[in-house]
Amino acid sequence: MAKLSVTGHEAAVHLLMLMTAALVATSFTVGKAIAQAMDPAVLTLLRFGLATLFFLPYIRYKFGPGLPGPRDLFRYSVISLTLAGFFILMFFSLRFTTALNTGVLFTLVPGISSLYAMVLLKERLGRTRLVALFLAIPGAIWVLFHGEWARMLALELGKGDLIFLGACLLIGFYNPLVRLLYRGEPMAVMTFWVLATGCGWLFCAALPGLLATDWRAVSATTWLWILYLAVFCTIVSFFLSQWATLRLGPTRVMAYSYLYPPLILLIDWATGHGLPPLRVLPGVLLIGLTMLVVQREGKKGAAIPT
C-alpha cells in the first residue's frame, strides 16, 4: 500500500478525531434521553460493566491473562474513582439541565486539569492552556446564562448545572492522576483496569438502586442506548483518541473537546429538539474558536510519525 503523505495522513487523523468528537457529543444527548430511566449509579455501572466485558477479549489476546498486583490495583482504583463519580453526577445532572449545558461545562475540564496539574505535577500552564482558559470560560458563561446579563449578574445557575460543575471539578483530576500514577504499562491495559476497578466503586454506589430497579420495566430502547454508550462512546472513542494522540499530540486531541457544544446543537436540531435562542450562539462560537487556537498552538509541538 502506498504511504500517505504527511498532509493526507494528518487530514485523515483529523477526520477521525472529528468523528470521535461527534461520538462523545452524542453521549450528552443520549444521557439526557435515558437519565430518567433508572438510578444514575446503575446506569453508569451498566455502561462501565459492558465496556469492561467488551474490552476484556482484546486485553487477553494482546497482553495475556495476567492480573495486576495490589499496588497497581490501588493506582487504578484512585483514577477510576474520579471517572465513576463523574459519570454518576453526569447522569444525575441531566435530569435537571440540558445536554448543551453539560457539553459547554465540559469544555472547562482541560483548564481545570491544567490547574490541578500545576499542583500535582508542578507543571506550568503555558501559552496554549492560558489561551484556552481565557477563551473557553467567557463562552461557557455566556451559554450557561442564556446570554442574559441579568442572570449573569445574579449568578442564576440551575441545579443541574451546579451538579455537573461538581462533576467537571472531579473529572479534572483524571488526566493529572493518569500522568502521576502511570508506570509504563500499555495505555490500553491501564484503561481496562481503570474501567474494571471503576465497576467496583460503582457496584457499591449502585447496590440500593440495583435492588430497587424494576428490570422488567426497562425498555429495549434504554438497553440499546446503554450498549451504544459502552461500545461507541467508551471503547471506540478511547481507541481513536489514543491512536490520534500518537500522531497529533495530546494538546491537539484535547482541543476537539471544544467542539462538543456546537456538535450537541447540531445533534439536538437533527433529532427534533430545536435550537436554543440566537443570543447564546456567540458563546458557542467563542468555544469553537478556542478549538482552532489550541490546534494552531499545539501543532508547533506535535510531530506526526512517518
Image (cartoon, rainbow, N blue to C red):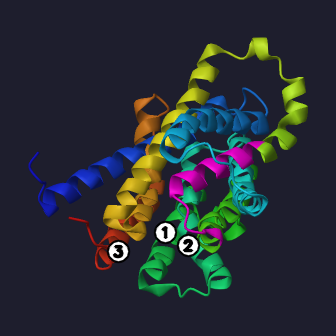
**Predominant secondary structure in magenta?**
helix
The amino acid sitting under disc 2 is: Gly
* Closer to us: 96 or 114: 114
What is the C-alpha distance between the residues marked 3 and 2? 15 Å
The answer, for residue 195, to whether it is visible in the render is yes
Q: Mark 3 or 2 closer to N-term?
A: 2
How far across and down, in percent of the image, does residue 27 sit?
54, 40
Q: How many marks?
A: 3
Circle 1: element type: helix
Task: Determine which residue is flagged by label 3.
Answer: 298
Q: Nearer the viewer, residue 268 or 193?
A: 193
Decide: few, some or many residues near mark 1? Use Cα within 10 Å; few <14, some 14-19, many ≥20. many
- The amino acid marked with disc number 1 is Ala
Residue drawn 78% across and 59% down? 70
Q: Is residue 266 magenta?
A: no
Kindly indicate the quadrant of the structure image that contains residue 167.
bottom right
At label 3, the amino acid type is Gly
Q: In what quadrant of the picture does the C terminus appear?
A: bottom left
Q: Nearer the viewer, mark 3 or mark 2?
A: 3
In the foreground, 72 or 21: 72
- What is the secondary structure assignment of the residue under circle 3? helix
- Disc 3 to disc 1, C-alpha distance: 16 Å
Going by the image, does 135 lie left or right of 157? Answer: left
Q: Where does label 2 land, which residue?
A: 111
Q: Is residue 198 above or below residue 256?
A: above
Residue visible at 57% across and 52% down?
189
Residue sitting at x 25%, y 66%: 305
Q: Which residues are magenta?
A: 181-199
- Rendered location of residue 139, percent (x, y): 49, 65
Residue at mark 1? 136
Q: Quadrant of the N terminus?
A: top left
Question: Quick check: marks 2 and 1 in contact, CB under 8 Å?
Answer: yes
